[in-house]
Image (cartoon, rainbow, N blue to C red):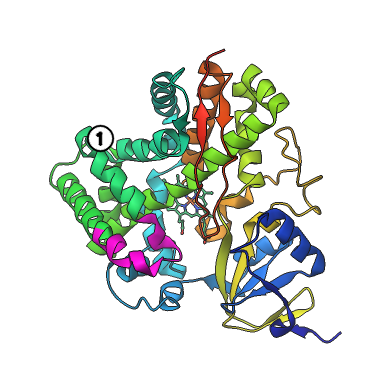
Amino acid sequence: MHALSIAEAQEIDTSVVPDIHAYLAGLRTNGPIARSQMGFIVALRHQHLDLITRDITRQIETEGKLIQGITSGPIFDFIKSSMLFSNGDVHLRRRAPVSRIFAFKLMDAMRPKAAALAAELVEARIGLGPIDFVNEIAAQVPARIIADILGIPRGDLPVFMQWIADTPEALGFINLDRRDEIEKSLVAFNDYVAALLADRRASPREDFLSQYVEATVQDEELSKDEIRTQIVGLILAGSDTTRGSLCMTLAHLLQHVDQWRAFCADSDGLKRAAVDEGLRFDPVIMGIPRIVVGDFDLDGYRIPAGTLLTISVPSALRDPSVYTDPDHFDIFRKDHPRWHPIFGAGAHRCLGEALARVEMEEILATIARLAPDTRLVGAFPRLAPGPIRQVDRMEVEFLGG
Ligand code: HEM
């Protein structure tokens, strides 16, 4: 049969839809792919996640910035020297020293620290009335844990938190009105991390950064800019993602009272499953983008080389061919694939998965233990459109049992 051209694909525009999951389900029923107004192709099925790792695609590099007219400057330089937006040997060189140290075992050792921080944050707020969960809890956990891993002094935390709030946008689509502000913060952030690295080069300690510096000495082809960028990248990649995922998982758990009760009764036994389902049900990652490097056919469409292709994560994670009753939040479901697709696949699979899981699991289990009668206050939180979907707001009231 003659393959259709991508110009014939249905259109997609998620920027204004009231219910993104219903909208994507409608598109997915109509056809396997959709075409955005900006010209990229969105693949909608779970099986399309395989495209991330096939040699007919490659990771986007600076193309995402060039589309926005960003051709130089701190954001451009950051993307250009990052591991996430690189390919082949360059990517391997940048990833290897971090992944050697940022291993699952080390991250699991962070569990008691994450649990202690969670207890400190929650305990201080029990019975205080409604609190801003996004900023007072969900933003604090990833920022403070990564600050701890990097050995950032407590006194520097406020300014560190400010950079974390200002700069993750650099990874995705930028609101160009904010470009100057983001770049100013990114430069200050870069300088700060460069100083931390210089300090560890001069006087190594028993910590992650010293080990990282040593590992990069072994891989001496890395420039100082590249070394610094991987550390800033690690911080940024783990902040908005974990914050939003934590908010949505807790919100859905609290909304499903029976499941929340079951979770409170056995939070240790159920924390991994609860996080798996939270990450599936309302994923913060909108899509995983790739560039097509060789023409190929995808479910009846001819996809030419050069196409910017995004695999829609919210659509894939509600694909009924994989998940039974996909629009039902169910922490007891048994049909999660072995590797959770929210963390990507292949060469670029998330380096921070273990850490994100530890953080999310420990804060949820702590709330269940210390404040089982916690309730959501006001409107249910929503994730705004964007490459990494941000929580608009979320208030909760921590109530002890
Ligand atoms: C729930 C939280 C998180 C989610 C959903 C998430 C998701 C992802 C995804 C989908 C990718 C691959 C993107 C691609 O292939 O284009 C990725 C890569 C990455 N993530 Fe995460 N992430 C999370 C938390 C973290 C944390 C906590 C860290 C570190 C502290 C981190 C560090 C990284 C790094 C360094 C990469 C780049 C890996 C590479 O290019 O080789 N992430 N993440």
Q: Residue furthest toward the front?
A: 378
Position of residue 314 measured from the top left corner of the image (x, y, whole percent): 65, 55
Q: Residue furthest toward the right?
A: 1
Which residue corresponds to the image point at 25% horizontal and 53% vertical from the top-left? 189
Query: Which residue is at the front of the view, 371 or 148?
Result: 371
Determine whether 384 is above or below 129 in the image: below
Which residue corresponds to the image point at 20% horizontal and 54% vertical from the top-left? 194
Q: Is residue 181 magenta?
A: yes
Residue position for label 1: 206
Which residue corresponds to the image point at 45% horizontal and 28% vertical from the top-left? 111
Q: Magenta-highlighted stretch: main secondary structure?
A: helix
| Residue segment shown in magenta | 167-184
Q: In screen coordinates, is 149 left or right of 248?
A: left
Assess mark 1: CB under 8 A from ligand 1? no
Quarter residue 38 falls in: bottom right
Label 1: state its secondary structure: loop
Amino acid, disc 1 = Glu
Position of residue 142 measured from the top left corner of the image (x, y, whole percent): 41, 39
Position of residue 240 measured from the top left corner of the image (x, y, whole percent): 45, 48
Q: Residue furthest toward the top?
A: 401
Can you say which quadrant of the picture contains the C terminus? Answer: top right
